[in-house]
Image (cartoon, grey):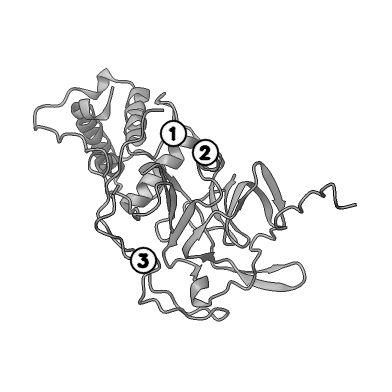
Amino acid sequence: MPWSSRPHLFAALLAVLTMACAGAGTTGASEPVPVVVEPTVVAPTEAAPRPSAVVPDRSRPLVPPVDPGSPVLSAPPASAPVDGSTPSPVGTETASDEVAVVQQRLTELRYYDGPADGVVGRATTTALQAFQKVQGLTVDGAIGPETLAALDDPVLPEVHAGAATQINIDLDRQVMVAVVEGRVARIMPISSGNGAPYSLPGGIRAESLTPVGTFTIERRIQGTVNAHFGTLYDPMYFHQGWAIHGSNNVPAVPASHGCVRLPRADAEWLYSVADVGTPVTVVGGLNAFDPAAGETAGTTEPAGDPGPPPEPPSDNDF
């Protein structure tokens, strides 16, 4: 049953969860739906100078101003507010039914790409984490009162006008918005550079930073790539050795050496829709460097990336 047709269940579930928290002493695949976002330019967060990097001019935007005449992308309408009538008892529904309603709502909002089966698995948890990041909530992947309230009246993600198919990465919120054929197709959690220094073979010292600016997918490798610091799944390189790739470890905070980690299922999906040449916009100031401003992270191979495979010999190479 769709989210919008179940206001009484939502109100009752929210009330039960709120009372439960108070008693414990705690505080607190259909056609894509167009997501319309007011034209905005995201300014990077002020960051302290880094010793190994040229300090960029943070007063300028990292992306060009949005043309107000460009097509813009709004979220599906929020469900109707509760009319004040007495809600139906939650006891008529099972816990799995309630989870299925949340999964359906997350699907409508483009955070979840799975069955509304009432089972809280990894896909549901990561979808909840991405949603909580965009809403500015505590990121725990759980269905609590604040998350339920936000599902009823969600904040829209920021999307930049531009190519019909594009990738938007927000380092400060640690989320990615994938736009396919002019519509927001998926909103996914990421984990980017953690800012820590590290060493590469040969004594190279580098920092775990992620590049900001406008890029394109330069090359892709389907499957696995075994790099110096671990395995990359379905990597898509957008700046030198920096890639968007699947990982078995995508915490709610920055944790990589500079690449943009996605849950493996999300990376596999993204690989299927983002070809070489797809625009990638990265904004934010969290553990970031700006190549256009002359900044560097101390390396061009943040994960010990071995680089593109050599071209196979032709018939004339004998």
Q: Is residue 137 among the parts visible in the rendering? A: no
Q: Nearer the viewer, residue 304 or 13?
A: 304
Question: Does 86 sit left or right of 140 as displayed?
Answer: left
The numbered mark, 3 or 1, whose residue comes first in the sequence reads: 3
Q: What's the residue at 34%, 63% (across, down)?
A: 42
Q: Secondary structure at mark 1?
A: loop
Q: What's the residue at 14%, 33% (across, down)?
A: 82
Q: In the displayed structure, would residue 191 be above or below residue 123?
A: below
Residue furthest top as drawn = 92
Residue underneath mark 2: 269
Alpha carbons under labels 1 and 2: distance apart: 10 Å
The numbered mark, 3 or 2, whose residue comes first in the sequence reads: 3
Labelled pair 1, 2 in contact (Cβ < 8 Å): yes
Question: Does 140 sit left or right of 273 as displayed?
Answer: left
The numbered mark, 1 or 2, whose residue comes first in the sequence reads: 1
Alpha carbons under labels 3 and 1: distance apart: 32 Å
Residue underneath mark 3: 64
Residue furthest right as drawn = 318
Q: Closer to the observer: label 3 or label 2?
A: 3
Q: Position of residue 109 (x, y in %)?
A: 33, 38
Residue 113 has which mark? Answer: 1
